[in-house]
């Protein structure tokens, strides 16, 4: 049965109730949250139909028949899916640790004594010898799950730019990171397929977000290049990169607004 999980959105929903239908949005994920809330009346068929059209617009080549959404689950700002965190795969964590240790060693290999100690203290990446460096968990704005058939992570950007780096990796942008984690989570949860939908500004010229989407969509070579940029991984293959390139959807806020104006579906 379709359902919507509000446990991770209590503060926003309290504000939403206070302001009725008029919300002063302070972030794009708040607006995305309100959009899903607004088009999920009493968990009824109108909300299910809206989500089906949302996915169909993001992935026009995919089929989303009504029966495929009969077991639909939507979560807002979730930290977990069941008992599983939205964390990078072990292969990614190992890749990152090796990369950071290599950067550290290259920076101080020619030094000794106090000079080496001072250089270590001043490194942008500060870590003790042989320690592990972990990439933190991701908290998607919205997660859609169609039983064991499909897992979709939604990243909404309107009032803030896309993140182009993480704490330890200056080349790990938010789009490739979400793709990587979506597929890792699907494998851990036993879900057949994963996808990422990016919702961004209506003006696409000169926008870093849309440049990244254009780079990855339909181009497995670019996806694989950025996944392996910091070193080899045993969980990345040509087949996986091809799946990821086909599994990146994108909508502008104007397209979301057009979906929001759709006629109500009879109950």
Image: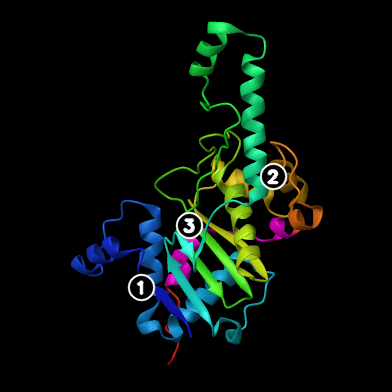
**Contact (CB < 8 A) between labels 2 and 3?**
no
Which residue is under mark 3? Answer: 140
Depth check: give the residue in front, 124 or 16: 124
Please report whichever mark, 3 or 1, sits nearer to the chain's N-terminal start: 1
Return the x and y of residue 80 as percentages of the image width and height. 47, 62
Depth check: give the residue in front, 25 or 154: 154
Q: Residues within 10 Å of mark 2 (few under 14, many from 20)?
A: many
Which residue is under mark 1? Answer: 38
Q: Residues within 10 Å of mark 3 (few under 14, many from 20)?
A: many
Q: Residue furthest right?
A: 238
Please identify the quarter of the rendering in which residue 141 is found: bottom left
Look at the image and give the residue range highlighted in magenta. 243-260
Using residue 248 as the reference point, say whether residue 208 is left or right of it.
left
**SS at circle 3:** loop
Which residue is under mark 2? Answer: 227
Q: How is the image coloured?
A: rainbow
Please report whichever mark, 1 or 2, sits nearer to the chain's N-terminal start: 1
Distance from label 3 to label 1 (Cα)?
19 Å
- Residue 54 visible? The answer is yes
Distance from label 1 to label 2 (Cα)?
36 Å
Return the x and y of residue 98 as percentages of the image width and height. 67, 34
Q: Residue at x 64, y 75 (%)?
A: 149
Return the x and y of residue 243 as percentages of the image width and height. 73, 60
Return the x and y of residue 3 as percentages of the image width and height. 43, 79
**SS at circle 2:** helix
Q: Residue at x 62, y 8 (%)?
A: 111
Please identify the quarter of the rendering in which residue 116 is found: top right
**Contact (CB < 8 A) between labels 3 and 1?**
no
Using residue 68 as the reference point, say whether residue 156 is left or right of it.
left
Depth check: give the residue in front, 263 or 133: 133
Q: Residue at x 36, y 73 (%)?
A: 38
Please report whichever mark, 2 or 3, sits nearer to the chain's N-terminal start: 3
């Amino acid at each position: 049965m379709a359902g919507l999980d509000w446990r991770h959105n209590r503060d926003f929903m309290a504000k939403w109730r206070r302001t009725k239908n008029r919300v002063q949005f302070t972030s794009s994920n708040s607006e995305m949250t309100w959009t899903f809330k607004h088009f999920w009346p009493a968990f009824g068929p109108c909300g299910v139909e809206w989500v089906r059209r949302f996915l169909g617009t993001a992935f026009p080549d995919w089929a989303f028949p009504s029966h495929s959404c009969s077991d639909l689950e939507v979560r807002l700002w979730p930290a977990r899916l069941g008992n599983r965190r939205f964390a990078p795969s072990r292969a990614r964590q190992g890749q990152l640790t090796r990369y950071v240790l290599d950067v550290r060693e290259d920076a101080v290999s020619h030094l000794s004594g106090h000079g080496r100690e001072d250089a270590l203290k001043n490194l942008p990446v500060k870590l003790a010898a042989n320690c592990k460096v972990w990439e933190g968990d991701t908290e998607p704005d919205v997660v859609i799950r169609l039983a064991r058939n499909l897992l979709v992570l939604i990243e909404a950007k309107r009032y803030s730019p896309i993140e182009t780096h993480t704490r330890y990796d200056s080349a790990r942008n938010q789009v490739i990171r979400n793709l990587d984690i979506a597929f890792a989570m699907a494998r851990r949860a036993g879900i057949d397929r994963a996808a990422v939908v990016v919702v961004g500004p209506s003006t696409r010229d000169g926008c870093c977000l849309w440049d990244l989407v254009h780079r990855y969509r339909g181009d497995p070579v670019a996806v694989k290049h950025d996944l392996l940029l910091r070193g080899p991984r045993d969980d990345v293959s040509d087949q996986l990169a091809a799946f990821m390139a086909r599994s990146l959807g994108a909508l502008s806020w104007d397209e979301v607004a057009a979906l929001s104006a759709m006629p109500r579906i009879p109950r």
